[in-house]
Image (cartoon, rainbow, N blue to C red):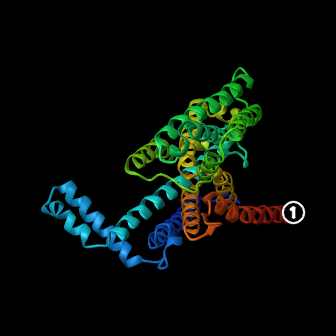
Amino acid sequence: MQLSKEQLRFSWQQDKRRQRKRLLRMIALTVAVFVLCLCFRYNAYYFSDKFVPVEYFRSYVLAARLLLSRLLDTALWHQREELIAALDGVIYAGALAQLRNMLVAFVSGAALATAGAIFQTAYRNPMASPNLIGASAGVGLGNVVVVMVCSTAALENVYLRYEYCYAFTVICVGLVLLLGRLAGSRDSNYSILEMVMAGSIVSQVIRVFTMYFMYNLPDEELVLYEEISFGVYNSTDKYSMIVFFSIMAMSLLPVMLMRYRLNALGMTRLETAALGLDTRRLRTIAQICGVLMSACAMIHCGERIGMVSLVIPYIIRQRLGLDFRYLALYSALAGGVLLLLCRLITSFVMIADAPLPISFAIELLLTPLFMFILATYRRNSDAD
């Protein structure tokens, strides 16, 4: 039965209204989880009173007043010592550290999930992720080289970690993209299957070098490398935060602004040719942004958290469809909430007098969830 224009318009408005309500609920859930996480102490396993919302929010209000007074150059800025002394110094410092920690966790989770959505759309493969073309392998090799160069100072020397991790990531990803272009046909110069194979081979070679360097590390430096790779500790000083948020802004914001155009990456070459679209440049920009944001997230939260970029976009695609406009937004919010919860869980638990790695919490939460989603999807497919 053919629908009239009024019926089509009504159906379109209803769908748009449902999407708006769903997005508002997701944003409200994200804000609620973020505010809840801000109420707990930073490194809560060292304290008996772990939930301190009043003290922490007084500290946040004080920090906001100091920032505004400094920006506006009011008389309040000259009384900052008295204002800081009005609160307990440990509570004040812990509140700001908790705020930085949660911001890094949320943005890292959002970046990883968005990068996974990019690669699953571009490769038209639900199992694709930035790790497919060697992002995590390059970060891992960079971390182990920094530990070899700086020894125990590698944890604080986040700038050198940025240099080495991005250098090896660029080399690894560049080789994979080059091999993918060479293996493609002359007209499109792009081959998904060959690029996946090239990514697997190059990543394996990089991991061989990583394992060799790990084998030659002393015991103390080997433990330090494992702490970095598992995301046990992360640097949240002022300058590392500037670098972190600058890279995220340069890579995450363009993807969000182009999310409507990135739907073209999910089309085949014949479909884009019929529409007169050339997606090669768009695909290259999207992949570069995805690699940049995922590498930055793994530098700060550990290279073993890459499962977020695989599972979260896959679940969102199964529930909400393939439209990248919504896929990117919901994946970013869901990934950010997941890492917030994992960072909060790891602040409570210690195993053998050591903090629980955030990657362990991610695997513990995502593995049964992913298995349940796969089983449910298979059951529904068999029923159809």
Name the quadrant of the C terminus: bottom right
Q: Is residue 312 left or right of residue 150?
A: right
Q: Give me the residue at 66% from left, 32% from top.
A: 274
Work out whether residue 259 can be spotted.
no
Say which of 63 and 185 sits in front.
Answer: 63
Image spot of residue 32 (x, y percent) = 48, 71
- Above or below residue 44? Residue 249 is above
Say which of 116 and 272 sits in front.
Answer: 116
Name the quadrant of the N terminus: bottom right
- Above or below residue 239? Residue 187 is above
Image spot of residue 232 (x, y percent) = 58, 57
Image spot of residue 188 (x, y percent) = 68, 26
**Badge 1 local density, few (<14 within 10 Å), some, or many (20+)?**
few
User: Which residue type does callout 1 highlight?
Assistant: Asp
Work out whether residue 177 can be spotted.
yes
Q: Secondary structure at mark 1?
A: helix
Q: Residue furthest left?
A: 75
Residue 287 position by quadrant: top right
Q: Give me the residue at 50% from left, 44% from top.
A: 153
Residue 91 position by quadrant: bottom left
- Per the image, the residue denoted by label 1 is 382
Q: Is residue 329 left or right of residue 313?
A: left
Q: Give me the residue at 63% from left, 38% from top.
A: 141
